[in-house]
Each structure stands twice: as C-alpha cells, then as structure tokens.
Amino acid sequence: MLEAKMNKGKDGDEAHAGEGLGEHEAPWDAPLADGALDARVALPGSKSLTGRELILAALGDGPGTLRAPLHSRDSALMVDALRALGTGIEQVPTDSPFGPDLRITPADELTGSTTIACGLAGTVMRFVPPVAALALGPVAFDGDPYARKRPMRPVLDALRALGADIADEGRGALPFTVHGTGSLRGGRVKLDASLSSQFVSALLLSGARFDEGVHVVHTGERLPSLPHIEMTIETLRARGVDVESPAPGEWVVKPGPIRALDARIEPDLSNAAPFLAAAAAVGGRVTVPGWPSATTQVGDQLRTLLPAFGADAVLAADGSLTVTSGGRLRGVRLHVPEAGELAPTLVGLAALAAHGTAGTDGEASEITGIGHIRHHETDRIAALVAEVNRLGGDAVELDDGIAVRPATLHGGVWQSYADHRMATTGALVGLRVAGVEVEDIGCTSKTLPQFPELWGRMLGIASGSGAPLDGPGGAAASASNPLLLTLPQTPDGTSWT
Ligand SMILES: O=C(O)C1=C[C@@H](OP(=O)(O)O)[C@@H](O)[C@H](O)C1
Ligand SMILES: C=C(OP(=O)(O)O)C(=O)O
C-alpha cells in the first residue's frame, strides 16, 4: 500500500520536473480563452481545514462528523494515516457532487506497528508524527521522492525534546520512524519555524493530548503563513481546547480533552485562486459561491490581492465572491509572507502582466516575502522562474521572491514538478498565451481532482452535460453534471477515502 501511493519519479533536483503522477501521460493543452468569462465555480472543501479536523476528530473524546470535507490525494493520505493508527473513518453518503461526509470514531488506544505514506503532503508528514508518538508501537513514515527533501528536522527535534523516540538516521527528513509509547510528556519546547508554519501547527494540534500540554516558542527571525497557525488555534478552540498565544511567536496548549464535533468544512479559498485570477487575466467575471464571511483561510486575501492587479472583487451578502475585470493586468509590488500558498497564482498573473494584456505594454512586478516556498511541493521560486522563462518570459529569482520584467510569452510545455499549484499556474498562463501545454495536469489531484473539468466548464468548453456554469448553486451543485460526480481514481486505483 505504501509503495502503491508513491510517485515513481527519480530522486534528484533536475529530474524532479516531470516526475508527477501522470508523468507518462501526454501534456494537457491549456485552453486559450476566446472572450470575456462569465462563470460561477463552486469548489470543494479546504485541504487545510479537512486535514486539521481529521486530526482533531481522531484525537477527540467521542465520534464526530466532517461535513463537506475535501476528497483529494492529500485528504485520502490523511484518512489512511489515521486509519492506520486505529481511527474509524466511515463515509456518509450525501448529495454533494464533491463526495461523502466522513464519520470519525477515535480509537480507544492509538496503535502503532504500521507504515504511513505521506505522498507529497506537508500536512500529513508534519501533523501525523505527533499523533504517532501517542500510539503504541513503531510507526514508519515515508513519501514521494521530493517529499524526502521537505524539511522535518525542527518538528522531529521538538518531538524528541518533548519525550518522543524518533529514528531518522540524522536525516531530519523522511523516511523516519516514530517509536510511540502510548503517551508523550510534552511541556515547553523551542523550535525554528521559519521554513514552515506547519511545524508549529503540528505540535499545537496534538498538544492537548500530551501529559503536560505543549508550550511552543518560535526562535527564528521570520514566521511564514501566520493565518495557518491562526486556523490551527481556531479549530482547537472550537473543540474546547485551551490555547493561548502569550507573546508573538509563542503558543500554549493546556492538556485536556479535545471535544468531538460536527464540523463543516469551508470551500478551499486557495484553490479558488486560479479561477478568480482567470477573471483578472482574461476579463469578464468569475463567481465562487460559499465564500465564508469570516475565515482564517489565507485565500480570503484574494479579495485584496487581485485588485492590486487591476481587478475588482466583491463579496456579496449571499456569500459569493465575484471578481470582475476589463482584462488589463497591472504590474504589482507585493510582499506576501502570509500568503505563500497563493504565490504561484500571483506569479502567473505577474507573468501575464509582463506579457501585456488588452493591447497594452507589459508591466514589471515583484513578489517578495515568499522565500519559504522553496520548501513547498517543489522549490517554487526556481520552478516558477524556470517555467515563465521557458515560455519566453523574463523572471528572476530574488532571495525571498521573484521579479518579472516585461517580455512577450510564447507557447511551450509548462512543467508541473508534481506540484498542483505549478500545474494550475500553467493553466492560468495558457488562458492568454496560445500553445501552452501543461505537463502532468493530473497532479492537481493533490487538492483538487476536478481541476481540469472545472477549468473547462469555467471556459464553457468541457465535455459533459453542458449544464450552465451560472445556474442555481453553480456548476458544481448541478446534479446533471456527471463530470463532477465522479472523482478520478487514486494512483493505486483505490477510492480517495
Ligand atoms: O498548515 C497548513 O495547512 C498549511 C500551511 C502552509 O504551509 P507553510 O507554512 O509551509 O507555507 C501552507 O502553505 C500549506 O499549503 C498548508
Ligand atoms: C504548500 C502546500 O502544500 P503542503 O500542505 O503540502 O505544504 C500547498 O498546498 O500550496
């Protein structure tokens, strides 16, 4: 099972491009937009919320339900991981086009003596080891070839300092084995989270189940993706956990029960990014329904980030976010340490702004504060620069960001590096540049298996029933839309959950 879910690519930086799940498939022809957009695109649940609620439900004090969870490769890996540790997770059928709800029954005692496949999911490789420390017996973790390059040392060392026994042969990365003893002392621990906020979230999520709780002190100079830590705190508080931040970069979780809950998952606002950006790039309007009025999701910042490029964003009283634009993109100077997850989309828009849109000259952009995205699914700074330049662009790597100077783009094969957000950025660029082909569009299954279908329907060109995108409830809520009712297969042919 562990083997079956691994990507089969080679393990090397250069070889990383093209090693995704669909490495042997022909590249996907990115559709060119042939006019202003007018689309309504409903999206499935948030990856980050689904992952957190699964962990907290597994550690909860009774059975609970996740409504409208994400079903994707990352969420399936999280479900498999928690099941391997003894958690009961059952599907509850609904009429949602995005898949069933989940009923979670915590294990009486978490059990080890198992293996966990992390795929390329940061949330699985960081959030599950503290849970494994609470299980009885060894738990071996591994992942895709590139996952072995993603940093783990701060969270492994912190767990050791809190009492865990972890064997990683000094790698500070996958593969490693957590020798769980059924409990963890916990207490105060220093940790440098400048490479990923997930190190902090990992300890906070399980911290209430440690004997002494957990007190995390961040020691690095910068702390990226703060909204994701706020999300962790909010999901803990919703389950009655006592969590405080007594000072910036410091968090205390008191030991105690994690309350079982019926949790409803918000749509994934970061996955909304390429769709809303499409309206900015092409012109016209794209609406995403179900936008929460208050949220910790960083995707909510699209409401201010897309206007920087010249688009308008309006959140209506009915909870739908509409982005409209005349199709002219302005160059931007954005410093977005909180929003690294949105950076690929922003760089895609910057590349189109530099290409020149709506008959105007190209404009330069600089997007900074995102050095940590070198440690995401791939080195996103290097990958974005390489792919923009492959199409004739003029992008350069900065220490903590990317500058894009005016240059006319042309078609070519956009490499995805097994990175869902690289793939969706290639699709975005392809809306305005003829002849862009995206290698391994299938890697979008990491968080949005329906991406190609939803993208096609946004443009009014997908096969299927032809249900109107702006019909009641949006495309994804249309019962006559068979595309969206069928989740693609996982790499090993099992169901996503
Ligand atoms: O906690 C989470 O769910 C996430 C935190 C962020 O990670 P980094 O802090 O590594 O950027 C984000 O980019 C990632 O997509 C999801
Ligand atoms: C960085 C990301 O994912 P992960 O959870 O694997 O870190 C992402 O989805 O942009």
Image: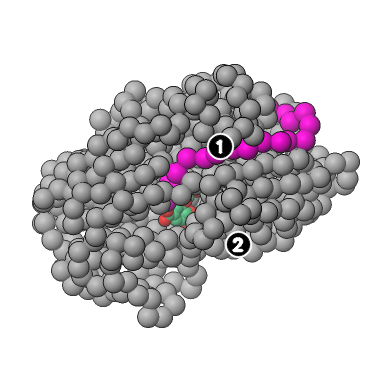
Q: What is the spatial separation of the Cα atoms under label 2 and label 1, in whole angstroms? A: 32 Å
Position of residue 447 measured from the top left corner of the image (x, y, whole percent): 46, 40
> Does 134 sit left or right of 54 as displayed?
left
Question: In the displayed structure, would residue 250 be above or below residue 406?
Answer: below
Residue at 41 percent of width and 36 percent of height = 72
Q: Is residue 42 rendered magenta in the image?
A: yes
Magenta portion: prevailing SS class: loop
Q: Is residue 261 rendered magenta in the image?
A: no
Q: Which residue is mark 2?
A: 336
Packing grade of label 1 (10 A; few <14, some 14-19, many >=20) is some
**Screen quadrant of the N terminus:** top left
SS label for mark 2: loop
Residue 284 seen by the camera: yes
Q: 18 or 39, which is in the foreground?
A: 39
Residue at 66 percent of width and 47 percent of height = 322
Residue at 57 percent of width and 19 percent of height = 465
> Which mark is nearer the camera, 2 or 1?
1
Residue type, mark 1 in image = Gly
Q: 251 or 288, which is in the foreground?
A: 288
The earlier-in-sequence mark between 2 and 1 is 2
Packing grade of label 2 (10 A; few <14, some 14-19, many >=20) is some
State the mark number for residue 497.
none
Q: Quadrant of residue 433?
A: top right
Q: Which residue is mark 1?
A: 473
Image colouring: one colour
> Does 491 sit left or right of 109 as displayed?
right
Q: Quadrant of residue 425?
A: top right
Residue type, mark 2 in image = Val
Position of residue 147 measured from the top left corner of the image (x, y, whole percent): 39, 44
Residue range of the region highlighted in magenta in the rendering: 31-48
SS label for mark 1: loop
